[in-house]
Image: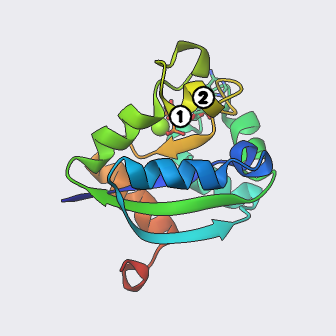
Amino acid sequence: MERTLAIIKPDAVGRGLAGRIISRIETEGFDIRAMRMVRLSKTEAEGFYYVHRERPFFASLTEFMSSGPAIVIALEAPNAIRNWRDVMGATDPAKADEGTIRKQFGSSIEKNATHGSDAPETAAFELGYFFPGIDLV
Ligand code: ATP
Ligand code: MG
């Protein structure tokens, strides 16, 4: 079993897509171990996306991620990290495969509906950023 952090980003929450995305998480066979709605400050978004601090899109990305409520979710499944990224699809919705969440619900390379950790180390950091161990059921 493996855990990963998923986020339903502010674009998707704002457009009323959270229910459909959570439903997809369940039908894809992930177990939800923790879930919470958050309204990130700019500083909290910057801390979360710290690895991207030198990228040209960092300011815009952290503005966007702090622009409205998001839903953070701890997922568990065999190969959860890889499998959740496959279900989400490519970062750019225009390049994402048919049937992926970002193809279906993403509106731009930035407003791409969901987040998923990309490796065991980042999953551990990202899960810990939002959930103390006691909150993981
Ligand atoms: P995430 O980390 O959110 O799951 P990802 O791993 O597919 O997405 P990253 O390269 O880690 O993509 O980028 C993090 C986020 O930054 C993207 O999901 C997207 O919201 C935003 N982003 C990435 N590339 C660009 C870009 N060229 N222009 C604007 N925003 C971008
Ligand atoms: Mg990433």
Which of these two is toward me, 14 or 131?
14
Image quadrant where residue 133 sits: bottom left
Residue sitting at x 37%, y 32%: 86
Q: Is residue 28 above or below residue 44?
A: above
Q: Which mark is residue 104?
A: 2
Residue sitting at x 47%, y 35%: 88
Which percent across, then down, holds residue 95?
53, 13
Which of these two is toward me, 121 or 26?
26
Q: Is residue 97 above or below residue 46?
A: above
Q: Is residue 112 above or below residue 62?
A: above
Q: Is residue 51 left or right of residue 106?
A: left
Which percent across, then down, holds residue 120?
27, 50
Q: Classify the position of the N terminus by image quarter.
A: bottom left
Mark 1 C-beta to ligand 1 under 8 Å = no
Q: Are marks 1 and 2 in contact (CB under 8 Å)?
A: yes
Which percent across, then down, holds residue 55?
60, 28
Q: Residue furthest bottom?
A: 134
Q: Secondary structure at mark 1?
A: helix
Q: Is residue 113 left or right of residue 63?
A: left
Which percent across, then down, holds residue 46?
64, 51
Q: Secondary structure at mark 2?
A: helix
Which residue is the site of mark 1? 101
Q: Residue furthest top?
A: 95
- Give the spatial CA distance, label 1 vs label 2: 5 Å
- Give the amino acid at mark 1: Ile
Which of these two is toward me, 72 or 77?
77
